[in-house]
Image (cartoon, rainbow, N blue to C red):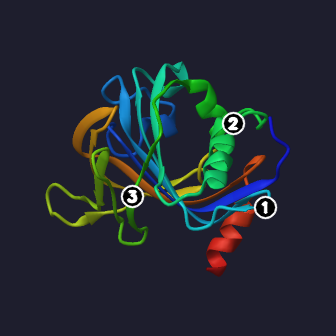
Amino acid sequence: MTDTPWRIEGKMLEYCSCDFGCPCESQVPPSRGHCDGVFGITIDKGHFGDVDLSGLKIVATFFFPRAIHHGGGHMQPIFDEHSSEDQRNALFTIMGGEGQPVGTIFQVFSVIVEHHHDPVFAKIDFEWDKEKRTARINIPGVAQATTVPIRNPVTDEEHHIRLVLPEGWMFYEAEGASGTAKGIGDIKFDFSQRHSSLAYYAWDNNGMAETFEEFKQSSAAA
């Protein structure tokens, strides 16, 4: 457990093997009985006590044999190769979830992820455009993923899905998109035209660092 104050905020990108819209967000079982994919964030601004975390990127590949709340998950974290030892220790502490309130993002992961694969320290390519619903993650030898807009199967026009979760635990609002992802590290998967989402996030010791109303105000001012 740590009493060290921390806060991180930036961009979030998610890929999973389920259909568009992510069944987990609607309390529905995984589309294919299991869930695997890629989760990544940029820390545009952040700190852990006196340790500056701004500018770092974190990615994880994952596999859950059933709906994620059943646990049994596998996860392999990937950190920026240029991160310092102090930064890595800070991130391991944050991601460990110990002492964080029940139901917050890293506390939840600490319960549902039971198999931790060795971390990778590598070059992370991370591209992200929420308005255009395009993105890309590439980690040589570990994972690669791309996001494009969902297209209408009849007209081929871009289809817009916005996920709004006033009681969200990872984000309050995300753009839904079409994801293609391949895991070639410890955790292997290969899928296309499945769920992807792009969102801004802000987390601290207590979970979501802003209320839904504060998020709406800051988004309107941006």
Amino acid type, label 1: Asp
Is 219 placed left or right of 149 in the picture? right
- The spot of residue 43 in percent (x, y) is 58, 62
Write down the quadrant of residue 148 in the picture: bottom left
Disc 2, SS: loop
The answer to which of 77 and 71 lies nearer the viewer is 77
Write down the quadrant of residue 215 in the picture: bottom right
User: Residues at badges 1 and 3 in contact (C-beta under 8 Å)?
Assistant: no
Amino acid type, label 3: Lys
Amino acid type, label 2: Gly
The answer to which of 132 and 141 lies nearer the viewer is 141
Residue beneath disc 3: 123
Residue beneath disc 1: 50
| Residue 122 seen | yes
Q: CA distance from mark 1 to mark 3?
A: 25 Å
Q: Residue at x 34, y 32 (%)?
A: 187
Marked residue nearer the N-terminal end (3 or 2):
2
Outermost residue, front direction? 85
The answer to which of 205 and 34 lies nearer the viewer is 205
Q: CA distance from mark 3 to mark 2?
A: 25 Å
Residue beneath disc 2: 97
Query: Within 10 Å of the Cα at label 2, are there few (<14), some (14-19), or many (20+) other Cα atoms?
Result: many
Of discs 1 and 2, which sits in the foreground? 1
Query: Within 10 Å of the Cα at label 1, are there few (<14), some (14-19), or many (20+) other Cα atoms?
Result: few
Q: Residue at x 38, y 30 (%)?
A: 35
Q: CA distance from mark 1 to mark 2?
A: 19 Å
Is 203 placed left or right of 206 in the picture? left
| Residue 166 seen | no
Disc 1, SS: loop
Marked residue nearer the N-terminal end (1 or 2):
1
Of discs 3 and 2, which sits in the foreground? 3
